[in-house]
Image (cartoon, rainbow, N blue to C red):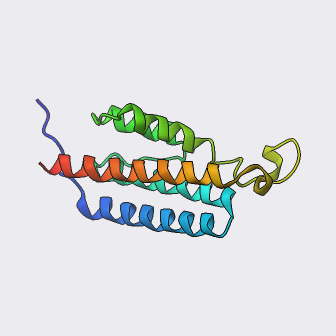
């Protein structure tokens, strides 16, 4: 049996705290009607939370694909519930189209995102951050 490496609390906290900042920014953008950037901010918050877990486990994740980060978490032995996996999938869709006009045939991202989209993205972001917190607590048990 191989020994489990120690958890890196400072590295987890460093990344996890930034996830809170990203989600707060996403909420602020949604409140003033900047829904495409709110969706991107929620996606960024989820990325930071997933990377917090992986860095805390000494995994050194690289990249920005939420689905890959979820797979890396599973490879590390973490269990993603269906709601968390679904949230990662929905949020991953906002990484490029929420920001770049050429991701759409016409119009700008601002015209493609509304209140419902940002509300869903914020909910999903909160779900992923809660998953990170609950998982981290379980790893300490």
| Rendered position, 129 above or below 68 | below
Q: Which residue is drawn at the image coordinates 71% and 47% (left, top)?
A: 97
Q: For this view, does 87 lie left or right of residue 32?
A: left
Q: Position of residue 9 (x, y in %)?
A: 24, 60
| Rendered position, 79 above or below 30 | above
Q: Position of residue 8 (x, y in %)?
A: 24, 57
Quarter of the image with the N terminus is top left
- Tell how many labels: 0
Q: Position of residue 57 (x, y in %)?
A: 27, 48
Residue at the limit of the structure toward the right, as seen here: 106
| Rendered position, 110 above or below 127 | below
Residue at the limit of the structure toward the front, as seen here: 116
Q: Examine the image and state in which quarter residue 31 appears.
A: bottom right
Q: Position of residue 4 (x, y in %)?
A: 16, 41
| Rendered position, 29 above or below 67 | below
Q: Which residue is drawn at the image coordinates 15% and 51% (left, top)?
A: 140
Q: For this view, does 66 lie left or right of residue 137?
A: right
Instruction: Note whether residue 47 is visible.
Output: no
Q: Which residue is drawn at the image coordinates 48% and 51% (left, top)?
A: 123
Q: Which residue is drawn at the image coordinates 35% and 35% (left, top)?
A: 80
Instruction: Note whether residue 35 is visible.
Output: yes
Instruction: Pick whichever, 107 or 74, lies toward us.
Output: 107
């Amino acid at each position: 049996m191989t020994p489990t490496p120690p958890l890196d609390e400072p590295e987890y906290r460093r990344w996890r705290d930034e996830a809170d900042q990203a989600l707060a920014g996403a909420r602020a953008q949604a409140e003033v009607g900047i829904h495409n950037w709110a969706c991107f901010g929620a996606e960024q918050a989820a990325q930071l939370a997933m990377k917090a877990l992986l860095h805390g486990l000494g995994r050194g994740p690289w990249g920005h694909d939420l689905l890959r980060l979820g797979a890396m978490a599973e490879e590390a032995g973490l269990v993603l519930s269906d709601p968390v996996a679904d949230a990662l999938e929905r949020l991953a869709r906002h990484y490029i189209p929420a920001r770049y006009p050429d991701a759409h045939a016409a119009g700008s991202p601002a015209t493609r995102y509304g209140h419902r989209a940002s509300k869903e993205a914020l909910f999903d972001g909160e779900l992923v951050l809660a998953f990170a917190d609950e998982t981290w607590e379980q790893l300490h048990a």
